[in-house]
Image (tube, coloured by chain):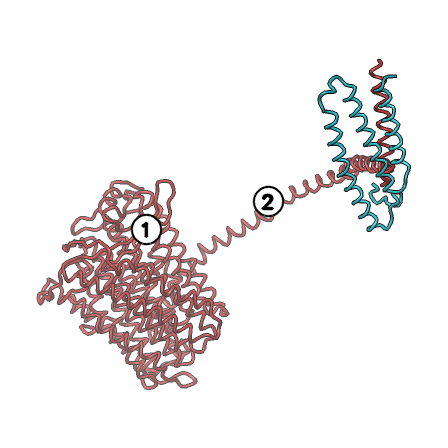
Chain colours: A red, B cyan
Amino acid sequence: MQETISFALATSPSGIAHSLWLIPAAPVLASGIIALLKQPRRKTAGTLSIGSLAFSLLLSLIAFGHVVAGWSQGLAVRETVSFTWLQFGTTNVDLGWVLDPLSAVMLVMVTFVGLLTFIYSTGYMAHDENYTRFFCFLSLFAGAMLAVVIANSLLLLFMGWELVGLTSYLLIGFWYQKPSAAAAAKKAFLTTRVGDVFFLLGMVWLFAQTGTLLFYNNGAGSMEPVALVALLAQPAALGLTAAGAIALLIFAGAAGKSGQFPLHVWLPDAMEGPTPVSALIHAATMVAAGVYLVARVYPLMQAGIHPGGSTTALTVVTWVGASTAVFAALIAVAQNDIKRILAYSTVSQLGYMMAGLGMGGVAVGMFHLITHAFFKALLFMGAGSVIHGCHEEQDIRKMGGLKADMPLTFVTYTVGMLALCGFPLLFSGFWSKDGILEAAQHWSVAKAPFYMLVFGALLTAFYMTRQVAYVFFGVWRGKKSAHESPAVMTLPLAILAFFAIALGAIGTPLWPWFRAFLEGRAAGFDLHGFSEPGLLALMATSTVVVFLGIGLAWRLYSSESPSPEAPDPLEKSAPPIWAILRDRFYVDELYGATVIAFYAWWARVADWLDRRVYGGLVAAVARLFRALAHLNRFLDTNWVDGVFDKGCEELSSSGGLLARIQTGRVQTYLRLLAVAVVALVAILIWSSRA
Amino acid sequence: MTPLTGFLLVAALLFSIGLAGALTRRNAILVLIGIELMLNAANLNLIAFWRYGPHPERLTGMMFAIFSIAVAAAEAAVGLGLVIQLHRHAHTTDLDAINRMKG
């Protein structure tokens, strides 16, 4: 489980590593320009967005190629470029970026899925009047996300992280005229903020302990052995080392962003935003940022691990991930909104990724992240296409039989659904999910996560089949008939569907290229990959589970075409459990009754204090000063002014007296002069005589 | 009565005449003439004190007088120029009519 890099490290930055900053800069620049455009300049806005992201994709591919080229020569590329951003006293705060297999893979995934989403958006948002604003936000999001990906400094990552949170807020609330969208935007922003506070605390602590926020800096970075040993030696509270405590704090931030229990509540509500936003931000990239963060600080997470053991941080990550996976999958079973089902499925799959990271290491979690990004973006865009085709209808009970009306959407959606279910052998989701299950099977700490994740897989197959059966099979139950979406929307679907299948090929036990690439080992084509003990049995188990889930759901939901009002087949058998699931385990209500109620009460207390206590004090002080001012005015008018006026009068009258001498006649002056001289002479004579 | 006293009396008389003229005349040119008379009284004093003073061989008094006359000539030119400008400006040389410098 401990990552051992057998390849030599290549750290001297190459040309592409030096220009890596251009990848996030291009979309940010485009966003800035679009912000200045007038509303009707739709075509310019779309072209700028797509063009800048295509440029980023091109650079990402070059960077990826560079890393792969180094890898095939037996070099583990980890090229960093850093610079000092702030200096106070002798302390430096450095920012920088890193090009390694992890960031290269994420770069390609984010730019590629992003580009397809942008193209899809030009079709989906074609009739929206705020088209330019949409692309401005979307480009800003892409830039911020790419900054998160390339960051070699926890601080730069945090900056991108917060920007991503901001754009998420802006885009969820894009249709801010809808009160539900505005509320969802606020909820998303505030809920992730809870995690971010812990993240910030962890970051500050890390900086205080190691004096640097750079991950890798030729041995002096915070994720490198010297700093980690120092962190391990430092005890914190509750039997944790500083390393463990900081890792947990950072994980809290990741849990907020990735919608892990108990901070998952914002993600389903985020579906109020436009569907391309849901696809790109709340399924493929942004929510994966939390998983990526954990993968980034993995050396910290696993600091002090014993072979075959686990650390506190990784154990927490595993349990949170596994319980979120089951919890969200249970809720998804009882939802009727097409996007909400997918949202809970996203929460559940993010739980899988976290569990994969916790038990199997970076490669296992990241592989599921990459495959999930493709098929979940595919599913969301497919759902967008369905919603578009059904005239903004989102309730799956009011759809049905769409496989005839929307054949392209149907085929691609089914591919995405099978990939998500983990349909055996053909689909990427099978291989990535199996990697996680395999890691869970071998986990030494506990066996429960394995059973939880298998149960989650059963539920996943069940709710996805239920959804597809409702939407695409049976008879049409809506009012206006549905229509297929334009090519600009279906083409990205087709491309994503291709990758939802093909990506599995790089992560099979037969040829574990992805894992070897991330871990810096040589990848062999190994026929013995399947002969590992228990692997075939595991694959058989997960196959059975998937077929069981699909079969059960198919039996329940394909035969009948329920009217929107009729109760769900499962509801009939166990109404109380169904109600709990439908109402999302009352987590929102629980928060409403505890946290929010507490804050409301606290706000009322503060309001009362403000009005009565502090307000009264302020008013008393004001009254005192008004009285003082009145006294002051009285003194001024009656005393100070009187003296002053008198002085002025005296001056003015004496001036008038003296002015009489100034006749303006030269001869008068001369005369005075003569009299003065005579007087002077008289005085001189008189005084000389005395 | 020494010769010096005589000279000084003449100079004092001359000065008084000039002063009286400067004070009583209304015509600016006549006031100027009065001033010239007073200047010349002063010149006369300078010569007298030199001539009957302790060192008549040094030409100090003469030099003073010559400088004073040169300055007086320049002053007369400036004064006449002022009077001419005054006449052009106010169409009169009556000093009583020109009292705009009153305080």
Residue A53 higher or lower than A191, as above or below: below
Q: Mark 2: which secondary structure? A: helix
Mark drawn on residue A613: 2
Q: Is residue A192 visible?
A: yes
| Residue B58 placement: quadrant | top right
Q: Decide which of A659, B62 is in the foreground and name it.
A: B62
Horizontal side of residue B38 vs A595, given as left or right = right
The residue lying furthest to the top in this view is A690
Mark drawn on residue B71: none
Q: From mark 1 to mark 2, how far is it between C-alphas?
A: 51 Å
| Residue A276 placement: quadrant | bottom left
Q: Decide which of A620, A54 is in the foreground and name it.
A: A54
Residue A196 location in percent, x, y? 38, 54
Mark 1: amino acid: Phe
Residue A189 location in percent, x, y? 42, 59
- Badge 1 is on which residue? A83
Q: Mark 1: which secondary structure? A: strand
For the N terminus of chain A, the image quarter is bottom left
Q: Decide which of A163, A368 is in the foreground and name it.
A: A163
Residue drawn 85% across the image and 28% down it: A676
Residue A74 location in percent, x, y? 14, 59
Horizontal side of residue A409 vs A538, given as left or right = right
Label 2: how many Cα within 10 Å (few below 14, some 14–19, many 20+)? few
Q: Which mark's residue is nearer the viewer, 1 or 2?
A: 1
Q: Report the chain holding disc 2.
A: A
Residue A429 location in percent, x, y? 23, 69
Horizontal side of residue A62 vs A600, given as left or right = left
Q: Is residue A202 visible?
A: no
Residue drawn 39% across the image and 64% down it: A29
Q: Sequence-wise, which precedes: disc 1 or disc 2?
A: 1
Q: Report the chain holding disc 1.
A: A
